[in-house]
Amino acid sequence: MTARVLIIAGSDSGGGAGIQADIKAVTMLGGHAMTAITAITAQNTTGVQGVHAVPTAMVLQQIDSVAQDIGVDAVKIGMIGSAETAAAVAARLAQPDLAAAAVVFDPVMVTTSGSVLADPATIDAFRALMARAMVATPNLPELEALGGEEAVLAHGCSLLVKGGHAEGDTVIDRLLETGEGEVARWEAPRIDTRHSHGTGCTLASAIACGLAQGMPLEPAVARARDFVRLALLDAPGLGAGHGPMGQQAVRNDGLFTGPALNQITLTANDYGVSAAFYKLMGLTQIVDSPSNGYARFEAANGVTLSFHVHEGVSDGNSGGATTYLESGALDAWVAYLARRGVSFDQMPRDEEWGWREARLTDPAGNRLCLYQAGEYRRYPPWRL
């Protein structure tokens, strides 16, 4: 069954954050997004020009409508609107029809542009939501406003400490559990862009979608982080301020457990001729390494194609091709296949170009590469 994700959050008229970002994230990750809108905002990339809170009774009515008919596997809570709504939502989520749903709480207080979206009374009411949540996902200023790591963990929820607001060229995100401390850590280079509106909303909704699909929390966070980073890299560059991300462009990126057929490497005998040919075909060149005889191109749907020049090959087809299948759970997939008798020429290993690869041949002798690359397939550090 398609994962059903209920999003309780505010609407962003500019489409960068809030309900709009949530729906895009859940949809692109294969879930079904439903909404209970807590506030209507007039905003764009430069800030929030107006906020109109939705009455608490209407928020609850939206929740009832979808829960009683469609059902809910996970809930993402963002901008809550008021202290009254926070308390009412926490009580509603404790009722039997929603008691089993995983809850991701993103305590939205301030927008990327600096607009305040939660008053002190509402922040104080967040305690009831943290007590119901599986994980809370504050940024560093929000975490400070909530009293710090121990104060959040005291409510019994897990805590994802997001490092985007910290200084430095490396972003560090940490997953903490009550009584255990840090259980996972992710580090990645900071993506230099002003088009980051909606990162927190997108991350929390992507985590909720993973939980709704049956993923444990840690891999759900890992996949959500990959999705956010790709959406940042794919940002369309709209607006004069903090522009929206590019969730709609995150396609065929191997974020699912099942294989994605998204890359093929062909053999070539003349670098310049082949490069010119694939540009003429309408593909966008993203890697240009003539010294290594290697080039990679991207199609409009995000699928990539490479060629590699090999000495002594007079016919481009005679060297054969390698088909690449990507999985977000490569090692588990390879182990599953190996237990069922599939023979591998190379078990999973990390390569210097940032991919983790396993290699084998099919019964007809065709070369296959099973791999996991995250953002490095379309956005390697040396991308043009």
Image (cartoon, rainbow, N blue to C red):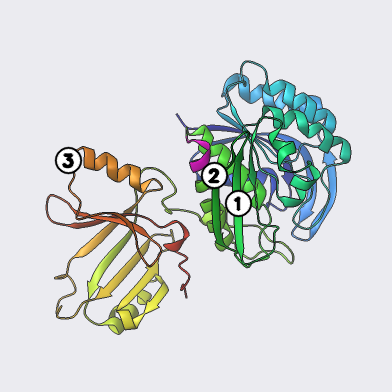
Snapshot quadrant of residue 70: top right
Q: Image quarter for residue 9? A: top right
Q: Residue at x 42, y 45 (%)?
A: 256
Q: Secondary structure at mark 1?
A: strand
Q: Which residue is mark 1?
A: 173
Which residue in the rendered view is the most extreme toward the top? 96
The residue to which callout 3 is attached is 341
| Sequence-wise first label, 1 or 3 | 1
Q: Identity of the amino acid at label 3? A: Gly
Membership of 216 in magenta stretch: yes
Residue drawn at x 67%, y 42% as measured from the top left: 19
Look at discs 1 and 3 and give the one toward the viewer: 1
Pinpoint residue 185: horizontal percent, then vertical percent. 55, 50
Q: Amino acid at mark 2?
A: Val
Name the front one of labels 2 and 1: 1
The answer to whether residue 234 shows anywhere in this view is no
| Label 3 CA crowd tier, 10 Å (few <14, some 14–19, many 20+) | few
**Residue contact at pointers 2 and 1, CB within 8 angstroms:** yes
**Which residue bears the numbered disc 2?**
221
Question: Image height check: is 321 above or below 74?
Answer: below
Q: Nearer the viewer, residue 36 or 230?
A: 230
- Locate residue 96, reporting x and y percent: 63, 15
Mark found first going from the N terminus, 2 or 3: 2
